Image (cartoon, grey):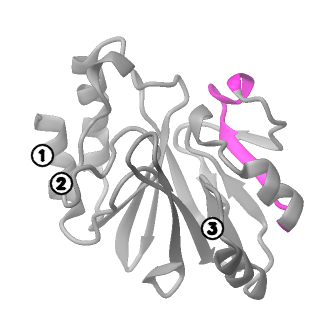
Amino acid sequence: MKTIAPDIQQWSFFSTEKQLDFNGLVLTVNDHCILVDPPTMEAADRTTVLKGRTVDYILLTNRDHVRETEVCRRDFKAKVYAPEADAPLMEIPIDKTYRDGELLPGGLWAIHLQDMKSPGESALFFDRGKGYLILGDSLIGKPPGRLNLLPADKFADVAKARESLKRLLKYNFETVLVGDGASILTGGREAVRQAIEG
């Protein structure tokens, strides 16, 4: 478990198939403990979470980041939130869906991104003194230190996907926490801009 900020921790599971880390987040904000896109959790990481506050919610950014949600729901008795457009495509029950612009538990804002790999792809933004942007599959941290789109064959129209990502630049953030690859802890907004420009 890696500490990003006093109330943000990240754990990772290396995917040999994709050759990059799958990341999950533990957020302890506004009296809530929230998991985001939980991948496989090693025993030490699970113990760390269990020793902290009770997990209230699991937030998913897209249909492909269900990952270990069912295990975490069972272990932590948490409620699962997912994007409205992706929820019907998931093979697990969803407790609540969310839409673009909705304020989620912990003070996270949902940002729906159109023309991505999945119809409900969403980013999450929250401001804890400095802004944090949480991304699912809209951009990945590969190679480390940079953000990139997934391969072109994952999109119906890459140009439309890039255009949709521009709305992220309306938010004031320094750190980008990615679901896949290496997160960007400083200079995140500029890294997003460079990824959009290609």
Label 3 Cα neighbours within 10 Å, binned few <14 / some 14-19 / many ≥20: some
Q: Earlier in the sequence, mark 3 or mark 1?
A: 3
Q: Amino acid at mark 1?
A: Gln
Q: CA distance from mark 1 to mark 2?
A: 5 Å
Q: Position of residue 82 (x, y in %)?
A: 67, 41
| Nearest the eye: 86 or 49 | 49
The secondary structure type at the circle numbered 1 is helix
Q: Amino acid at mark 2?
A: Ala
Asked where in the image residue 98 lies, by quadrant, the reply is top right
Q: CA distance from mark 3 to mark 1?
A: 29 Å
The reply to whether the C-beta atoms of the residues labelled 3 and 1 are less than 8 Å apart is: no
Residue 182 as seen in the image, left or right of residue 3: left
The reply to whether residue 182 is visible in this rendering is: yes
The reply to whether the C-beta atoms of the residues labelled 2 and 3 are less than 8 Å apart is: no
Q: Position of residue 77 (x, y in %)?
A: 88, 63
Which quarter of the rendered picture does the N terminus lie within? bottom right
Q: Position of residue 175 (x, y in %)?
A: 31, 67
Label 2 Cα neighbours within 10 Å, binned few <14 / some 14-19 / many ≥20: many
- As drawn, the label of residue 40 is none
Q: Which residue is at a point 30% across and 25% down the rendered structure image?
A: 161
Q: Is residue 5 above or below residue 89?
A: below
Region of the chain picked out in magenta, as a range: 76-89
The reply to whether the C-beta atoms of the residues labelled 1 and 2 are less than 8 Å apart is: yes
Q: Amino acid at mark 3?
A: Gly
The reply to whether residue 77 is visible in this rendering is: no
Q: Which residue is mark 1?
A: 194
- As drawn, the label of residue 191 is 2
Q: Which residue is at a point 23% across and 61% down the rendered structure image?
A: 188
- As drawn, the label of residue 106 is 3
Which quarter of the rendered picture does the C terminus lie within? top left
Q: Nearer the viewer, mark 3 or mark 1?
A: 1
Q: Which residue is at a point 77% across and 29% down the rendered structure image?
A: 91
